[in-house]
Image: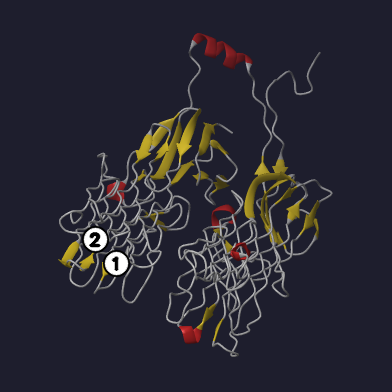
């Protein structure tokens, strides 16, 4: 029987002629395409942000870009989720936003006050991004009890900041692009500082560079949005007369926290930006009203997709004869290993190995890969673990910082600490690659038995700083790279810690964590998530202080428009650069398939 297509067999693609028109939907109703030929769209769905809690920021609403959703001529039903309330004894999660049958999850509310007998109240709620942990004041409990921030949904957001000790206060809400900062301890006059909300998601790789009408202008008291960032977490609360600063809302509309004067002189907490999905900023103990979450939004890019068919007869014959040409895809890559952990006694962690074929510093560029249609296992290194693109490109974990023992080698080496047991830094570029994947750590310094400073961990483009009197070494600088579009740095080394007297070392650009400091007390910080930054060195005698984990690694691949990518699981994302290139970004281990569209 004759076929309606003239006898040609093969796969048929659904056509869509949307002319790449971009528009947003800020209230519930029906989305109708601006072009009559539109049949599919690339759709960003952002849910409402979570309300803030007791000193804790609300988590951002879940934010996810769906590469292709159907858009019939009759339109698509849209529900825009509202932000979670922060009034009354029960704070609220954000509400889910949906586009037809696709949806994301509302942001988690911030944790409450974990007073006796129920410290679990301080735990942040899960959501698209998790709420930050609240106040913990359990005098009868162990001093190092930890309260967690709420978990985020893989592919939609990140967790809220946790409380590292007891007493403690104020985790930042998680953002769509990064976790909320951890709260600080002790929660006492003259204690530690603030916890910012996690950064939002940069959507310019999907919808084009800013400025554009679809991108929100910057607002008062919220994280910046005009650069095309959305769904930032809410900042923590503070108290000015206790020298406890409020946390800033994450870029992408997260609300700033309040910092009044106790008792009675309330500060100002800001709600998440409307139609950003930002989390609410936290109130303070001086009576500030708490910030609510921001409402959600839907952004649609109407797709141009031509239909097509493939004749298979000649293909089968040529494949049988071994003469069918093999199409090779030109694939650029960025592979960054997990950062090394900072030592609990001084040395900053080395950055994970940095390997890239383009879009970064020319001395560090390897060769573009030429790959046939194939499937590859992607491994994302946690702290002290390698990342890899199959067996083709492996970036080593960063070396752990030195303290009670020697600093470790790695993609970049860990910083040294005590002399002689841990003063020598770890070597970088181990095992060796060409171009080199990292640098050595910096040496530690011991002035006397009770006075020492750690060296900084090595970074992708610079060695860690050597410790001196009175300063600990700074982390080595990472490498900038634009493979995702924005200029982002990766693989910065962790800063060294300082113990009586002295100043701590700053983390290197590219996610390196800052070192700790004994006097005045400053807690060290972790390496940035999915940057491969080294963790900051700690001061082991400070209550509850310890090693800080290095940042998780990342793998990104980019190829011309003639290539198609498939990525799993769903928290790894696919996008199309405004110039047409296809991009696959992996933040957790999974599988990449490379093929022709």
Asked if disc 2 and disc 1 are in contact, CB closer than 8 Å, the reply is: yes
- Residue highlighted by disc 2: 455
Residue 122 placement, left or right of 367 = right
Q: In this orientation, does residue 231 appear?
A: no
Q: Position of residue 243 (x, y in %)?
A: 45, 82
Residue at image location 56% in from the left, 44% down from the top:
574
- Residue found at x 24% / y 39%: 432
Q: Which residue is mark 1?
A: 505
Q: Residue at x 55, y 44 (%)?
A: 572
Q: Secondary structure at mark 1?
A: loop
The location of residue 364, given as percent across then percent down, is: 30, 47
The mark nearer the N terminus, 2 or 1, is 2
| Between 236 and 574, the one nearer to me in the picture | 236
Q: Residue furthest right?
A: 74
Left or right of 288, for residue 170:
left
In terms of depth relative to the viewer, which is nearer, 87 or 21? 87
Residue at x-position 21% and y-position 68%: 450
For residue 176, side relative to residue 445 (left or right): right
């Amino acid at each position: 029987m004759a076929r309606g297509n003239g006898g040609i067999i093969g796969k048929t693609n659904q056509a869509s002629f949307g002319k790449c028109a971009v528009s947003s939907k800020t209230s519930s109703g029906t989305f109708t395409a601006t072009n009559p030929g539109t049949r599919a769209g690339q759709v960003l769905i952002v849910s409402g942000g979570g309300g803030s809690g007791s000193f804790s920021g609300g988590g951002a609403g879940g934010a996810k870009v769906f590469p292709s959703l159907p858009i019939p001529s009759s339109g698509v039903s849209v529900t825009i989720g509202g932000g979670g309330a922060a009034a009354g004894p029960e704070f609220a999660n954000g509400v889910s936003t949906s586009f037809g049958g696709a949806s994301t999850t509302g942001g988690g509310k911030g944790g409450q006050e974990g007073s006796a007998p129920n410290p679990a109240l301080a735990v942040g709620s899960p959501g698209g991004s998790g709420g930050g942990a609240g106040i913990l004041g359990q005098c009868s409990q162990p001093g190092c009890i930890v309260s967690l921030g709420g978990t985020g949904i893989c592919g939609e957001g990140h967790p809220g900041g946790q409380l590292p000790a007891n007493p403690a206060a104020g985790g930042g809400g998680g953002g769509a692009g990064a976790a909320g900062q951890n709260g600080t301890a002790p929660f006492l006059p003259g204690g530690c500082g603030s916890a910012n909300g996690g950064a939002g998601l940069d959507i310019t790789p999907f919808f084009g560079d800013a400025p554009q009408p679809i991108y929100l202008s910057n607002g008062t008291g919220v994280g910046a949005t005009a650069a095309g960032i959305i769904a930032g977490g809410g900042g923590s609360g503070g108290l000015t007369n206790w020298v406890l600063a409020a946390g800033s809302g994450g870029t992408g509309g997260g609300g700033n926290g309040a910092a009044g004067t106790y008792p009675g002189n309330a500060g100002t907490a800001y709600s998440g930006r409307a139609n950003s999905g930002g989390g609410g900023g936290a109130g303070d103990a001086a009576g500030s009203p708490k910030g609510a979450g921001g409402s959600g939004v839907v952004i649609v890019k109407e797709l141009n997709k031509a239909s097509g068919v493939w004749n298979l007869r000649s293909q089968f014959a040529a494949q049988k004869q071994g003469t069918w040409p093999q199409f090779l895809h030109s694939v650029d890559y960025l592979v960054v290993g997990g950062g090394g952990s900072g030592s609990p006694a001084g040395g900053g962690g080395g950055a994970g190995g940095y390997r890239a074929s383009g879009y970064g510093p020319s001395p560090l560029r390897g060769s573009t890969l030429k790959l046939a249609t194939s499937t590859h296992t992607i491994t994302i290194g946690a702290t002290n673990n390698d990342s890899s693109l199959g067996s083709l490109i492996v970036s080593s974990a960063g070396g752990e910082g030195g303290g009670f023992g020697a600093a470790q080698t790695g993609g970049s080496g860990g910083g040294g600490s005590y002399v002689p047991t841990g003063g020598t830094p770890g070597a970088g570029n181990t095992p060796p690659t060409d171009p080199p994947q990292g640098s050595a750590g910096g040496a530690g310094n011991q002035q006397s038995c009770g006075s020492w400073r750690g060296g900084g961990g090595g970074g992708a483009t610079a060695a860690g700083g050597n410790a001196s009197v009175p300063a600990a070494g700074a982390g080595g600088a990472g490498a900038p790279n634009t493979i995702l579009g924005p200029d982002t740095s990766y693989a910065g080394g962790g800063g060294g810690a300082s113990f009586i007297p002295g100043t701590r070392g700053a983390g290197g650009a590219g996610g390196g964590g800052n070192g700790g400091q004994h006097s005045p007390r400053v807690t060290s910080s972790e390496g940035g998530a999915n940057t491969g930054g080294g963790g900051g060195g700690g001061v082991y005698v400070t209550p509850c202080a310890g090693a800080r984990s290095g940042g998780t690694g990342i793998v990104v691949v980019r190829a011309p428009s003639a290539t198609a990518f498939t990525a799993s699981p769903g928290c790894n994302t696919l996008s199309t650069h405004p110039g047409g290139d296809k991009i696959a970004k992996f933040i957790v281990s999974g599988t990449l398939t490379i093929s022709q569209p």
